[in-house]
Image (tube, rainbow, N blue to C red):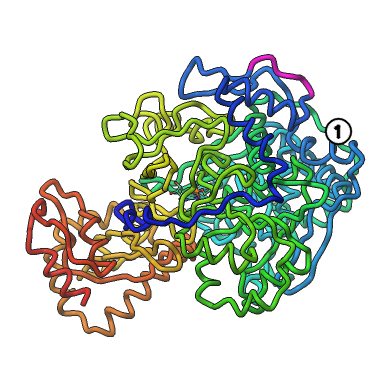
Amino acid sequence: MAADGNIDNLLHETRRFAPSEQFQANAVAHADLYDSAAKDLPAFWGDQSRELLHWHTPFTTTLNWSNPPFAQWFEDGELNVAYNCLDRHVEAGNGDRIALNWEGEPGDSATYTYAQLTQEVKKAANVLLGLGVSRGDRVAIYLPMIPEAVISMLAVARIGAVHSVVFGGFSSESLRARIDDAAAKLVITADGGWRKGKVSALKPAVDASLTIGGEENPSTVEHVLVVRRGENDIDWAEGRDLWWHEQMAAADTEHEAQPFPAETPLFILYTSGTTGKPKGILHTSGGYLTQVAFTHKNIFDLHPETDVYWSTADVGWITGHSYVVYGPLANGATQVIYEGTPDSPHTGRWWEIIQKYGVSILYAAPTAIRTFMKLGRHIPDQYDLTSLRVLGSVGEPINPEAWVWYRDVIGGGTTPVVDTWWQTETGAIMVSALPGVTTLKPGSAQVPVPGIHIEVLDDRGTPVGKNSGGLLVVAEPWPSMLRGIWGDPDRFVETYWNTFAGKYFAGDGARLDRDGDIWLLGRVDDVMNVSGHRLSTAEIESSLVSHPRVAEAAVVGASDETTGQAVVAFVIVRSVEPDDDDADGDGDGQDDSHAARDNGTEASAASGSGTPPEDVDALAQELRAHVATQIGAIARPRQVFIVAELPKTRSGKIMRRLLRDLAEGREIGDTTTLADTQVMTVISASVG
Ligand code: WTA
């Protein structure tokens, strides 16, 4: 939903759902959280942290904000994140509790108790140490949703190293960029994983990524640890590649978790920003674990003895970090993880899994809900979903219709739906209802989490009142806040902290309704949100212009009924075939194509009108595939329009707003600031 979406319609939503009796028991305790947080925010988080985590060395200070925006939480305390997620539950007598119910896409499955998971992580920690990975080293993880993904992350955390999980759907180029940026020493991958009914290979992408640029461009990677999952044929680099199962079989089973200072880096997770280069968001240990555990427990009303929790997110995204690995395991929860897609081998797969494991808490994305809505309720109606008692939504705004359908059809008309707003950068949920106390309002994320200070500001930085819109900021530091952008402190300050001095600028538009509840309106920058995944317009544009036929490209996120937004590209093609150097589409190609771009308008205007239609279609398909290969399938444009011109201001800035109007089939807005006011007529004609 774009910031200029039809918010007025949404605000007329009148349906309300008060907490049901089932949740009343917690209501008092939950209401207290708001009160105590309001009294003293850092002290509140200190209390929560002591209650939820085990500190080897207790902290004596909570927040150090003497050098903003570089916060330190619980800085003199020491803990081990993996110990908190594993050993302590075993020591408390819960070793036989199931930690993971893993379901493979083809229907195979595996179960790990807390004792077994602890054992596996200890072995994996010893494998890492044996490969020379030590405290502070970076490890790239490129795996499907299999237990080894969770085990790897925890093993890295256990030894004080730093993981960088790269979503398995990203291309070898994207993987390499992330490996290089973090200077990763080790890659943990699999031969392949199951997706959409077949094995999708992963190891070949790692091989390709490590040879990008040839011998002159060696990577920092010393070893590739390979989990056998897909059993697909793969190439093997002797000396570099090692089988996970062989290493694990030989590993020592004893490993004592050492305490590390609270601010020890835990992971880097890359996310799209407004430039072509993804940002390596850095999270650290004590504050992060405190807030993910706190939010997971309270927002989902978790009772670890009886609940079965399932987040459908992949570990490649922040939700998979915070609400598959760290939050649930810190809380000793029993959870389900699923390898595949919701429609494999049939469209009832999710509901079948819920029935099979008796899932009581489900955390999913609006895109999936809307897809199921379209397929019809007769599919979920075939399954017993009565175990469900709390439903969560994350990643993008959930429209009231989808919210109500989710509650009625999946939640049997009784479950609360908590719409949770947060970001890779915030590390944990920041805005959400609490099922015990909040009267729910479909479509609104509603209220800040206890201990979180949210404001909606106008352009001058003044808080807007009720019934007004503006920009969402976090006005006070919070425990799971990002600690920086890996290797780029200036970009960190610039991106998040310079818009409104001392306050964190999230990049989202928001509106307060007449009760003061928060409605998220989508990004206000050039970041798109497709199926709950963040994509940068600039990154896709630079991928497009790296194609030899492309002179210039503009990408917009157009509203899409199912995926929230969809990538739509407008491309000016080059009439002259480039030389071979450009054709391999490496970074230099962009500079080369720049020259062509200067006279591109004229040349491609001719080609735009003169290219036979079937060539235009073929080229558009080729460009869609090009982006998928370069960045990953999630970035593949829904449509590529070959156009003769792009709408620009006199200073040469592309007016994406006008292209969005076109892509969404709306009347074209104000064109008076265009350098050539006729250009939209020309473009509309070629879009057809
Ligand atoms: C959007 C995902 C509306 C928002 C956890 C944010 C949401 C971006 C919601 C972060 C929500 C996330 N309602 N919008 N409940 N949750 N967003 O980093 O635009 O992948 O800035 O983190 O997703 O995406 P990210």
The magenta region covers 56-61
Residue at (66, 41) in percent of width and height:
298
In the displayed structure image, the side of residue 375 where residue 470 appears, left or right: left
Q: Residue 684: x percent and y percent?
A: 17, 71
Residue 190 vs residue 325, the one in the foreground: 325
Residue 589 in view, yes or no: no
Residues packed near mark 1 inside 10 Å, few (<14), some (14 to 19) or many (20 plus): few
Residue at (44, 42) in percent of width and height:
517
Residue 332 vs residue 384, the one in the foreground: 384
Q: Is mark 1 within 8 Å of ligand 1?
A: no
Residue 666 in view, yes or no: yes
Q: Residue 269: x percent and y percent?
A: 55, 44
> Which quarter of the rendered picture does the C terminus lie within?
bottom left
Q: Is residue 597 magenta?
A: no
Amino acid type indicated by mark 1: Glu
Q: How many marks?
A: 1
Residue at (60, 69) in percent of width and height:
409
Tell me: residue 315, above or below residue 125. below
In the displayed structure image, the side of residue 658 where residue 422 appears, left or right: right
- On the image, which quarter does residue 515 sit in? top left
Residue annotated with mark 1: 256
Secondary structure character of the magenta stretch overall: loop
- On the image, which quarter does residue 52 sit in? top right
Tell me: residue 78, above or below residue 631. above
Tell me: residue 178, above or below residue 42. below
> Which quarter of the rendered picture does the N terminus lie within?
bottom left
In the displayed structure image, the side of residue 551 where residue 543 appears, left or right: right
Q: Residue 18: x percent and y percent?
A: 58, 50
Q: Is residue 59 magenta?
A: yes
Q: Residue 170: x percent and y percent?
A: 53, 59
Residue at (84, 53) in percent of width and height:
98
Residue 630 vs residue 292, the one in the foreground: 292
